[in-house]
Amino acid sequence: MLGKYFDNVRKNVPLVHNITNYVTVNDVANVLLACGGSPIMSDEPEDVEDITTICGGLNINIGTLNKSSIEGMYRAGRRANELGHVVLLDPVGAGASALRTNTAVGLMDKIRFNVIRGNISEIKTLALGSGTTKGVDADVADAVTEESLDSAVKFAKDLASKTGSVIAITGAIDLVADADRCYVIRNGRPEMGRITGTGCQLSGMMTAFLVANPDKPLDAAAAAVCTMGLAGEIGWSRMQEGDGNSTYRNRIIDAIFNMDGETLDKGAKYEVR
Amino acid sequence: MLGKYFDNVRKNVPLVHNITNYVTVNDVANVLLACGGSPIMSDEPEDVEDITTICGGLNINIGTLNKSSIEGMYRAGRRANELGHVVLLDPVGAGASALRTNTAVGLMDKIRFNVIRGNISEIKTLALGSGTTKGVDADVADAVTEESLDSAVKFAKDLASKTGSVIAITGAIDLVADADRCYVIRNGRPEMGRITGTGCQLSGMMTAFLVANPDKPLDAAAAAVCTMGLAGEIGWSRMQEGDGNSTYRNRIIDAIFNMDGETLDKGAKYEVR
Amino acid sequence: MLGKYFDNVRKNVPLVHNITNYVTVNDVANVLLACGGSPIMSDEPEDVEDITTICGGLNINIGTLNKSSIEGMYRAGRRANELGHVVLLDPVGAGASALRTNTAVGLMDKIRFNVIRGNISEIKTLALGSGTTKGVDADVADAVTEESLDSAVKFAKDLASKTGSVIAITGAIDLVADADRCYVIRNGRPEMGRITGTGCQLSGMMTAFLVANPDKPLDAAAAAVCTMGLAGEIGWSRMQEGDGNSTYRNRIIDAIFNMDGETLDKGAKYEVR
């Protein structure tokens, strides 16, 4: 049962340092507040070490990276590693440009990540050094389906084993794996892909879940994925005639604001392989 | 009938690279998703060429320009031109500062734009090398009115002829012109000016419309303007007691999410001069 | 009665230059539009002097400062001082990092601020050169309570006297002081702390209030605080089953959009000490 991992977030109010893109940053902040965490944003290299020191976790998202923020990612990541903080990588657009691929790979080389969360195209790029990312969205050819599930689970576990990170691959079916176990999660709605930043929001929230559940990174990460997916379902059920993706964004964050462990336990749809 | 240009966006799912300001960027992304496109944002000079290469169009908006992003605009624009991609310029605040005016003029000198979209004060600044921009909003003295319409249409056509770009001037009455024809559009609501970024949103969406309708830049641009204005009307019709500009923003994007070519054909209000 | 200060904003449509963080900037722009002002954002050092020149006020918020924007803050601040414009400082996260503390203190040394607005931890940091800021939120140990009110009022007046700025300390109880008088304000809802950026929004709006009421900086600042708090109350009263912090954000801005001086006069809860 994953509900307790959610309740621990509300109990512990984890402070999360986000180096994230300017597209979805406001939603990331509001999702962190909705789930019971506390967000702070800073990417200036001379600021990030102090900021990450007072936090419990660090969420690195390369969505609108620039030379200065890349330096900030390295500095913050090293400091967070020294302090034993939770560190998450969201390799937005890895495979779409050399700079993004190289930055993600370079960060993985120098920083120890507790979790890496991306879509299948991004994660494949990191694993294989190549990919077919279509912009910031996953390529259809890569999609995790019921047919490709066995091999995708093996891929996720192998990458987790190789990197020592929990690997979270989100899409129609979500996978969250360490070397031994893989959560296969079937929450969520396809319409979530019509909102910008549900992945970025999940990465911020997942960091808070890991901070609040330090001994259970795999289960905490899976709980965050189920929370986001279930919020997508609850939010969709509240949509009215004429509502669209902008209102849907609000309703998803609202659903997280109103969620608790019990609701999550009832609504989470997963198996462990 | 402009509806088919909208339907082509949904059919083709154009990927649009946006170098845009951090004020309204989230709304630009959600509007692109709402109309059926796919957004990606990148302004780092070392990233933009790769990113624009995988896209179909490039939307350059100088709203919160800085030295690094200006270099990104030039690099991305040159690459997009080499590849024959659609490129749009939104000269936010041209006339309000020397840097903005010079950047817009400089970009027009080096990059071939398929469309330039701005308010009348910004466009006059580009045309005449002067202007009376009041911040990022048009000066009342410049406004296109029924009285000044004939001369404004001529101005738009002349500038289109001189630049080789479709010229889109938005305000109470919208004009979209090439050298020969000018759409005069009367969709929209005055309350749209009380939301930040409806112009930026339109620029992002217009880029997608041109990518999806490569042989019809003028008509595609006009269809985008009608879509935005009609969404403003539909969104306003759904406003309830106590709602204000923040909810209106959501309802406009929602209306685009729910729009199709048929709705646009019924609601578009324009003449061609 | 504070309502007239609000009505003056609608009458004068003050143009406000914001150098603010990319987390909450969209909400700051929409709040400024909601209250009747007009926002423009610019942080590039080569752009800010021109931009601030055409505005009536300057809102400096250090929430996601970087080396370039810090230079922009100094340049814009100096120019605004030369022109006699209203200048506000929002020292987000002062006390949380050396860079933030030093930037805020350095700005106070070189720029004359009409108002400084922050939470109690940030303001204590500025006053005492130390603080216990918990990220960007106030530390509970610092909170202004009924018990600590007398000493907090004295602290605010003393700091106002020392700096020559109106001091606005916002929290469960808000204080707005000059050397002689202190507004003690009890509007607002605790749930406002679950939305990112209500403080940033207030700073933007407060700048507009001071521009529109040039002879009454203290009362105008207090009116802005009451407006934000009352909007929080009105917005909360419109919340429905299932709504959360994302919808609450919209409803607060909507409430400001629909507010007028009369509503403010009826709803403002304050005393002057």
Image: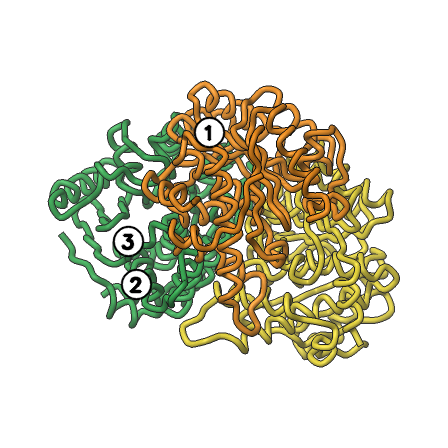
Chain colours: A orange, B yellow, C green
Point out which mark residue A86 bears.
1
A269, above or below A203, in the image: below
At horizontal 31% and vertical 37% (from top left) the residue drawn is: C122
Image quarter in which the N terminus of chain B is found:
bottom right
How far separated are the C-alphas under marks 3 and 1?
Answer: 29 Å
In the depicted view, which residue is nearer to us: A194 or A212? Answer: A212
How far separated are the C-alphas under marks 2 and 3?
Answer: 10 Å
* Kind of residue at badge 1: Val
C11, above or below B210, in the image: below
Residue B124 in which image quadrant: bottom right
Residue C87 in percent (x, y) is at 39, 45
Residue B16 in percent (x, y) is at 73, 51
| Residue under numbered circle 2 | C233
Taking the view exactly as shown, the residue that stands out farthest to the bottom is B266
| Residue under numbered circle 3 | C190
* Kind of residue at badge 2: Glu
Q: Residues within 10 Å of mark 1 (few under 14, many from 20)?
A: many
